[in-house]
Image (cartoon, grey):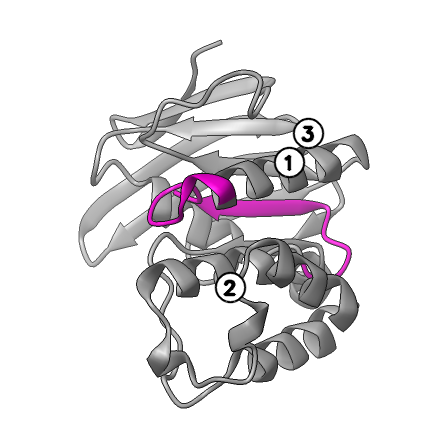
Amino acid sequence: MLRFENVQKLYGNFLALDIPSFTINNGLVWLKGENGSGKTTLLKMIAGLHPFKGTILLNDNLTIKNQRQQFLSLVNYAEAEPLYPSFLTARDLVKLYCHAKKGDIQHTQRLLQQLHIYDDYKKPLGAYSSGMIKKLSLALAFTGNPQLILLDEPLITIDADAVNVICAVIQQHVEKGVSFIITSHQAVEQYQLPFNQVLLVANRTIININ
């Protein structure tokens, strides 16, 4: 569970988000909103990539400001349009992520095989297509033992088979007690991802719409 208390995000003098009090439940959460509404900003705040005013609590006892390392060890994030240095390989990133998140390299390798990019495991990322980069980013988001995984537009760029793989992996993790906050402009069928909470980012805040 995530709880927001007096959370504000400003860019200079511009107030981008203002969340006086809000709770996001455990489970599978769909975060909707128009382009520019603040969805990505919100995810990056939770992921520790954007500073903000106020408090975000995980499980009612961890805050990103007071227990940053412990908080971030439990939260994984995949960007909508990931960028990595072109000279690195997938193997480099898998080793780095698994070291940082105390993950199982073989587990990540198996997911890369399911996504049909393991044959390029040792190639520099500069040789990857945008879809291959996206698949790698999504595989890395499942590294370690997170309690919360943030996925920003996970279903764009990748092929239909990869969408099915990712949806199945998400559901497997939900069954194990992992929570997700997912943004998607695409319509998602209930059989693919059975969301238990749907939220809308609008008017600089979060609204529960289900």
Give amino acid for label 1. Ala
Return the residue at label 2.
Answer: 136
Observer able to see residue 50: no
- The label nearer to you, 3 versus 1, is 1
Marks 2/1 in contact by CB < 8 Å: the verdict is no
Which stretch is magenta? 143-161
In this view, which residue lies farthest toward the left?
A: 13
Give amino acid for label 3. Asn
- In the rendered image, the vertical position of residue 96 relative to residue 109, given as above or below: below
Q: Is residue 59 left or right of residue 78?
A: right
Q: Is residue 134 left or right of residue 164?
A: left
Q: Position of residue 53 (x, y in %)?
A: 43, 51
Give amino acid for label 2. Leu
Observer able to see residue 143: yes
Residue 208 in the magenta stretch? The answer is: no
- In the rendered image, the vertical position of residue 15 relative to residue 103, given as above or below: above
110 and 203: which one is in front?
Answer: 110
Residue 178 image-quadrant placement: top right
Q: State the separation of the CA atoms marked 2 and 1.
A: 16 Å
- The label nearer to you, 2 versus 3, is 2
* Residue at the spot 41% in from the left edge and 79% down from the top edge: 125
209 and 157: which one is in front?
Answer: 157
Residue 108 image-quadrant placement: bottom right
Image quadrant occupied by the N terminus: top right
Return the residue at label 3.
Answer: 26
